[in-house]
Image (spheres, helix red, strand yellow):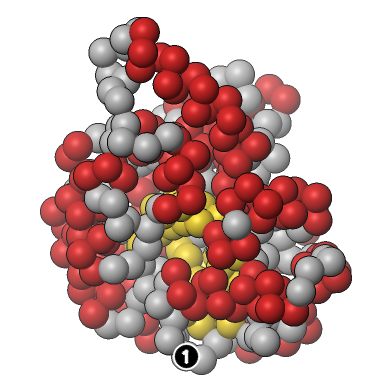
Amino acid sequence: MIRIAAEEAWAPKEILERYRKLLQEKPESWDPGFRSLWGFFLGPTERATALVRRIQDLGPQRLADMDATGIAKQLILLSSPGVQVFEATEAVALARDMNDQLIAHLSDRYAGLAAIAPHAPRDAVKELQRAVGLGLKGAVVNSHTQGAYLDDPKCWEIFEAAQALDVPIYIHPNTPPREMIAPFLPRGLDGAIYGFAVETGLHLLRIIVAGVFDRFPKLRIVVGHLGEGLPFWLFRLDFMHASMVRAQRYPGVKPLEMKVSDYFKRNIWVTTSGMQWAPAIQFCISVLGIERVMYAMDYPYQFVPDEVKVTDEMPMSDADRKKLYQDNIESVFRLR
Ligand code: 1DF
Ligand code: MN
């Protein structure tokens, strides 16, 4: 068995420089979440400088960290918000550049996902096709794009392309958009502590209830942080969705072919990023099945070498542990 980590972040200096420029040029009110996140990580603290050093590296530093924690391979994602914070034309060109850089680093230690610009869906499809042709294993979408969500029918051609290419889309967190973030900020709840999960869980639910998986039944979506809390909610989601449909309460809520929880067992996979806690991992395995849960570290944001022990020591068969660390990710992302 080898350990493969499924949600590992990378951000080269070109994009960090563009983030710096945005922070300088844009007003405070433009995207408070972006400012909260990258204003901190591009700032002077010890945590920030260590993070910025590690996140740019796809060379000796990262490999040494992987060796120290027994990680054989990382699936690399362009860190949040990636290209999606830039206007569409710039985002399209930047995605191509980022993907070319990542493709140049692919090896037996690194697999990668393509950055795409969901606000230019036609270009996003073309870039996904190009990048997959050159060895990337799917797309990462860092949740909302300036307040817009993938359940917008304009974006469905991206789902169509992913299904046709037989590659997954990883919906990775972003800070809540301007319209949503105000009550999170004063208590510091906008980021990885909770705001990420609220926003990304909402995004996945929008995709499900919009009927995306009825239209694209073979589409594969992967989410981190043990499904952003949604596995815990499945019973209530099924009950309340059915009752809303029956009551015809909202014009935008249409019947689905299956229960909300059924899509979790057919179209959705979760990773353990940032959630190295046996009871929560075991709960997800028990409700979704061992085939649906994959290991992720969330390097370098949550580089805590000891945490690998949680998964190493969780009571389960060797065959199941191999699924968690290796078989599931290899099969969902077609790594071999
Ligand atoms: C953080 C966490 C930042 C995760 C991330 O990307 C990220 C953090 C900007 O701790 O601020 O990917 N994470 O996935 O938990
Ligand atoms: Mn992450």
| As drawn, 104 above or below 84 | below
Q: Is residue 144 left or right of residue 8?
A: left
Quarter location, residue 316: bottom right
**Hey, which residue is sitting farthest bottom in the picture?**
108
Tell me the element at label 1. loop
Q: Looking at the picture, which amino acid does disc 1 mark?
A: Ser
Residue in view at x 76 percent, y 74 percent: 317
Picture coordinates of residue 69, whole percent (x, y): 77, 79
Mark 1 CB lies closer than 8 A to ligand 2: no
Mark 1 packing: few (<14 Cα in 10 Å), some, or many (20+)?
few
Q: Nearer the viewer, residue 8 or 315?
A: 315
State whether residue 25 appears in this view. Answer: no
| As drawn, 217 above or below 145 | below
Residue in view at x 60 percent, y 41 percent: 231
Picture coordinates of residue 21, whole percent (x, y): 43, 50
What is the total number of numbered labels drawn onto the structure image? 1
State whether residue 258 appears in this view. Answer: yes
Picture coordinates of residue 118, whole percent (x, y): 27, 48
From the image, which quarter does the C terminus lie in?
bottom left
Residue in view at x 20 percent, y 64 percent: 164
Picture coordinates of residue 45, whole percent (x, y): 75, 53
Residue in view at x 67 percent, y 87 percent: 1
- Tag 1 residue: 107
Quarter location, residue 190: top right
Quarter location, residue 129: bottom left
